[in-house]
Amino acid sequence: MEKISVAVRFRPPNPAAADPSPGGAGGGGDREWRIDDTRVTLVHRAAGPAPGAPFVFDHVFDRTATNERVYGTVVRDLIGAVVDGFNATAFAYGQTSSGKTFTMNGSDVDPGIIPRAVRDVFDTVRQTDDREFLVRVSYMEIYNEEINDLLTLEGRRLPIKENLERGVYVAGLREEIVNSAEQVIESSAKNQIDSEDPIRVSVLNLVDLAGSERNNKTGTEGVRLNEAGHINKSLLMLGNVINKLSESGKQRGHIPYRDSKLTRILQPALGGNAKTSIICTAAPEEMHIEETRGTLKFASRAKCVSNCAQVNEILTDAALLKRQKREIEELRKKLQGSHSEGLEQVVLKLRNDMHKSELERDRLAMELEEERKLRIEQQKKIEGLDNTSISADQFTDSTQLDALKTPDSKYIPDGFVAHRSRYSNDVEFSPLPENLDNIANDDLWTCLNKGCVTDLDMLEMTPGLKREASLLQDATSIALLQEKLQPIARCNIVEASYSQSLLNRNMGAAPLEEPTDARCQRLEKDCVSDRQQLEESNVRCAALEKERDLLRDENSSLQQEISDSKREANLLIAEKQARLDDSIARCVAVERELSVSRQDADRLAAEKQELAGELGVERQKMEELKQDIRVISRAFSQREGQLTSLYTKSKAILENCKASHVATLP
Ligand code: ADP
Ligand code: MG
């Protein structure tokens, strides 16, 4: 959509009225029009601007503006558009003697819009290398609501018609093909001007309106008055159409284009398929203030009208066929190519994403399961711990109790024994016997260590105490030790560490006793820390479960997306297929029509040949007849000669007889 371009042009004042003031249109009198860039305001010379807002337009020209400037500002761009295939219209509107004809036709010194536009059309055509042009011109007048062709005397009262291809047009209007004139331009791409290329047809209307006479001012009467009435009707209808078009969409309703020939012909230019420039001409004199105000109001409303111009292409059957074939090919390519490929890629990606998230979900489920197992295990351990709290009453033999008493060692929570390379040769001060098999087998150690490997430095040792070999051979002690170690070995690392201390003690270290209460407290502390760990794992578990739920949601939304994409892809494919089928059907129909036309053409050619043969025969017969006629006429003229001489002879004989008869009379 693009707005109509509207300019206002004030002509120079009549010499009598001329009284130029700076910035004024120079009409003389108390009031005058003031021009300020693109604004026009009515001012009282004495008191400044008269009430009322200024009129604002795309361009305002004062008396000094030449036709060249007006054309360059308002019309030149239209010519390029026309050559490109757009319709365009330029017309002048204004009261009588305001300068419409001067603007449209101009003078020898300063040609107006029409001659300049014509020249530019041909210049632009010449500069356009890639197309060929056919320029046709027509010339008409609208007089008393009748359209007359000005190029031929026969073309009077021509009707206005409309069809899809040409839009609104005057039927029967003569169009002359010209090499240097105006109005109609057709073009097609150069080097390919076979019948398969679209032809661009554009119309350039250049209109010089007759002014609205003020009957009381001009004193017209009779036929002239009637004529003026028609002119006024045209202009009134033009005003009405512009009024309606300038209203906003909802109030607009019916546009009365059909109320006059002028508005009907200008229909494409007014809110239709054309680029339009209107030059509103105005007289500056004070006596014309009311008409000028009317013209400015018309111009203001015209400024609100939008047109929708587009390139006009005409397709021949062959061009249509070619274009459809191209379309089908493109559709086919699209179907096989990038678009469906793109969709497939999207589907593949979504599938991949889904697969990944499924894997992630499985992994999380496994982690969750492990976590759950760990938690259960820990729960069991805690329960076991609660159950294994040892009290002194359990032991009948005090040596047994002694064996369990805590050695004088510092508690190391995580430390444990396994790595003893550095101590293997230090027999005297090793905290452990050379051969542990004598005390506990590998399984027991593994069990005790819970698979944990720790440096011996981590162990709390009682230095300087000599190992008593005899004790190691004490089978009862070992058995007891093993018996006491077994239940503890099932517990956690803390217990194992404690066992180590116990071992140390049994190996002859000075028994350092830990009071039962302290031990209970320690165990309780362990319990609390375990519980804490358990709670932490619970929290982690909950977080993992949440994450799993989120992933599950994401997964289902991805699946939804995939099925949506699939549905969309199917719809697209179906649509493309339908269009393809449609185009193919159209192609087939056009091809069928073409073949029918070809058959018709062949048949006509055969008929023509037959007729030509017949014509030849007829011609020959005619020749023979002519010959006969010639022979007959020759015979006829011979006979005529004979008859004439016979007649002459008979007449002479008769004369002689008459004479002899008279002589023989008495
Ligand atoms: P209209 O066609 O509107 O009735 P015309 O174009 O015939 O008016 O103009 C009336 C008179 O004013 C003519 O003599 C014309 O030469 C003169 N005229 C109009 N406009 C201008 C202008 N811009 N500069 C000089 N003379 C002008
Ligand atoms: Mg005129």
Image (cartoon, rainbow, N blue to C red):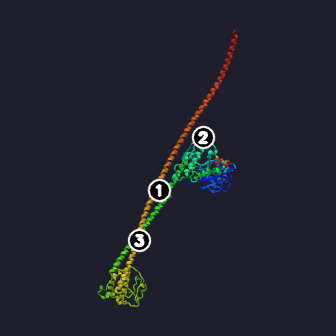
Tell me how far mark 3 sits from mark 1, CA to CA. Answer: 41 Å
The amino acid beneath tag 3 is Leu
Nearer to the camera, 541 or 43: 43
* SS category of the residue bearing label 1: helix
Question: Where residue 221 appears, x then y in whole percent?
Answer: 62, 41
Marks 3, 1: nearer the viewer: 3
Question: Where residue 23 appears, x then y in whole percent?
Answer: 66, 56
What residue did someone put label 1 on?
A: 572
What residue did someone put label 2 on?
A: 156
What residue did someone put label 3 on?
A: 544
Around disc 1, counting alpha carbons within 10 Å, would you say few (fewer than 14), some (14 to 19), or many (20 or more)? some
Question: Where residue 82 appears, x then y in whole percent?
Answer: 60, 51
The residue most toward the front is 46
> Is ligand 2 within 8 Å of the beta carbon of the residue shown at mark 2?
no
Look at the image and tell me in which quarter the N terminus lies. bottom right
**Mark 3 or 1, nearer chain start:** 3
* SS category of the residue bearing label 3: helix
